[in-house]
Amino acid sequence: MNRRGQCLCGAVTVALAAEPKMVNMCHCADCQRRSGSPFGMAVWLAEADVTISGETRAFVHLSDKGRELTNRFCPDCGSTICYTAALNPGLIAIPAGLFADPATPPPMRSVFEERRHPWVAVPHGAVRLPRGRDG
C-alpha cells in the first residue's frame, strides 16, 4: 500500500507504508470537537509504517476515560494530522479525511456509540461499542 494524504494547506504530508490494522469511527466528545463533525474516522497503523513530513504541533489531553491522548496538528491550517493514545503504544491514528480518497476502507468499529448522533449510519458489519474499545 502506498496511500498519501495531506493537511488542508499542504504543509504537512502523511505516507502509509502498510494497510491499516484498524479503521474506527469514534463518536466521543473529543473526536466530535477535534473533527468538527458528529464523529471522527481514523485508520490505525504501527507508527513505523507512517511517515509524517512537515512541522506539527502537539496538544496533550485526557480522554473520556482519563487516558492520555496526543493530537498533532498543522500549525498553519489547524488540520489534525494524527493522534496517539497511551492505551495503544506503538500505534498511530491518521484521520481518514487527510486522504480525501473514497477508496479508504470503511470503519470496522464504531466506538463511543452512547454519544452517536441518532441519524449517523454505521456500516453493516462494524463492531459497535457503547464506550471505547473495551465496550
Image (spheres, rainbow, N blue to C red):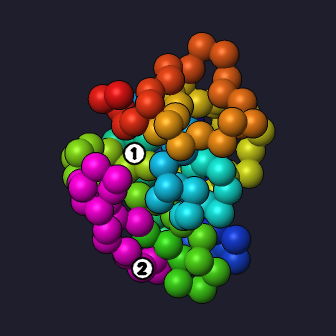
Pointer 1 or 2: first along the chain: 1
Residue 87 coordinates in the image, percent (x, y): 23, 45
Q: Residue furthest bottom?
A: 76
> How many numbered marks does the figure carry?
2
Asked if the stretch drawn in magenta spans residue 8, the answer is no
Where's the N terminus, which quadrant? top right
Of circles 1 and 2, which is in front?
2
Tell me the amino acid under the disc marked 2. Answer: Arg
Q: Is residue 91 above or below residue 84?
A: above
Tell me if I can see residue 118 in this picture: yes
Which residue is at the front of the view, 116 or 6? Answer: 116
Identify the residue at image location x=50%, y=20%.
127
Residue 49 coordinates in the image, percent (x, y): 39, 45
Residue 115 coordinates in the image, percent (x, y): 53, 43
Horizontal side of residue 65 vs 105, given as left or right: left
Residue 109 coordinates in the image, percent (x, y): 50, 28
Which residue is at the front of the view, 77 or 5? Answer: 77
Q: Which residues are magenta?
A: 55-71
Tell me if I can see residue 13 in this picture: no
Q: Is residue 40 above or below residue 80?
A: above
Q: Is residue 48 above or below residue 110?
A: below
Tell me the amino acid under the disc marked 1. Answer: Asp
Identify the residue at image location x=35%, y=28%.
135
Point out which mark residue 27 bears: none
Q: Which residue is mark 2?
A: 57
Q: Which residue is mark 1?
A: 49
Q: Dot 1 lies on which element? A: helix
